Image (cartoon, rainbow, N blue to C red):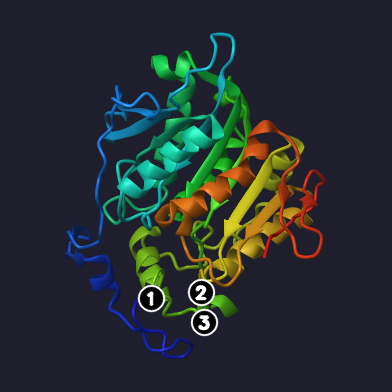
Amino acid sequence: MADQHPDLDPAPAIDAYNYLDLVLHPDGTVTRGCSFDIVNSPANPNPDRPSAVRTKDVPVDLAHNTWARIYVPSLSPPPDQRLPLIVYYHGGGFVYSSPAHEIYHDFCSLMATKLRAIVVSPSYRLAPEHRLPAAYDDAMEALRWVRTTEEEWLREGVDFSRCYLMGTSAGGNIAYHVGLHACATVADLEPLVIRALILHHPFFGGLQRTESEVRLFNNPTLPMNVADLCWELVLPAGAGRDHQYCNPMAGERLGEWERMRTMGWRVVVVGGGRDPTIDRQRELAAQLEANGMEVVGLFGDGSNYHQEELLELAKAELLLEKLKDILRGGALAIPAAGDGKINCGQKRMRSTE
């Protein structure tokens, strides 16, 4: 069960269902409570303040009731200049949330402003009513929608040759798996040209605990028994946590990694030392780098926790400063102990501690 691993784990400090405010029903559906601190922000295509980001919601797939929120920075570029596109997938353990959730809305608004980019944040079907790969399928469908839609905010403002896939937590997991699929279907996505994957505190797991998962088992932001419960609810029926959707080291990925490398994609992995999943994030980054990918690791120290940039926008601004050069296609300069800067233009993984 999600709450007990008596052979390995410390005693859980909280009940996972209570933490998520979920009630599981015999038919496999859940009732989501109101105490999980989700406040939604409405879209506003015509904000009163000239400096505000314009936002609006548009349908993507009527059959699956999916939609996307578009964010356009306040100062429109000249007619002959188009902006890069960030496709951003929200978090929530695959079980909760939407692009309207205040923390994702504020983060995407800040990204649009600071990175001078148009952001598209698609919704996806939630588990357990829709187990994986439903979220991956919806995320891929959103990319296909972006390339074909006549939505004027995209047609008039986006440079489709500069597309970046990004996600936080479960959204980071989605961005990774969408990247694996998209690299094999590049021709089908034209004129979209993906330049990088930005995995922000990506949510991964596995059956055998890592050192960080044991040490931070009762971490208040992401308790491991809560993470286990999410995986029980979202993985295909009968699958365990070593399924490739959960464990990025499971399955054979060398072909996809080689295609990403050949296409020149960068992979940015952002993690925090107080995140129980940090070891898995580091392992993925190291494996990608060992297979020739250009990887940038932005790994904080022991004070950094899961999704912290969503909850502390001052820290989000620091992260976005580091991402600016990624969107410009240049070398990424990040602080390092000893010399102040590291040039990440070389095909090496770099991390900031």
Label 1 and label 3: CA atoms lie apart by: 11 Å
- Label 3's element? helix
Residue 283 in which image quadrant: bottom right
Residue 199 appears in the figure:
yes
Q: Amino acid at mark 3?
A: Val
Q: Is residue 308 above or below residue 327?
A: below
Label 3 and label 2: CA atoms lie apart by: 12 Å
**Image spot of residue 300 (x, y percent):** 60, 63
Give me the residue at 69% from left, 42% from top: 266
Mark closer to the observer (3, 2): 3
Q: Nearer the viewer, residue 81 or 131?
A: 81
**Image spot of residue 97 (x, y percent):** 30, 50
User: Going by the image, does 118 lie left or right of 278?
Assistant: left
Where does label 2 land, which residue? 207
Label 2 crowd bin: few (<14), some (14–19), many (20+), radius 10 Å? few
Give me the residue at 26% from left, 41% from top: 41
User: Going by the image, does 38 lie left or right of 178?
Assistant: left
Numbered label attached to residue 214:
3
Which residue, as the protein is rendered here, is positioned at the far top?
Answer: 79
Where does label 1 land, which residue? 225
Mark closer to the observer (1, 2): 1
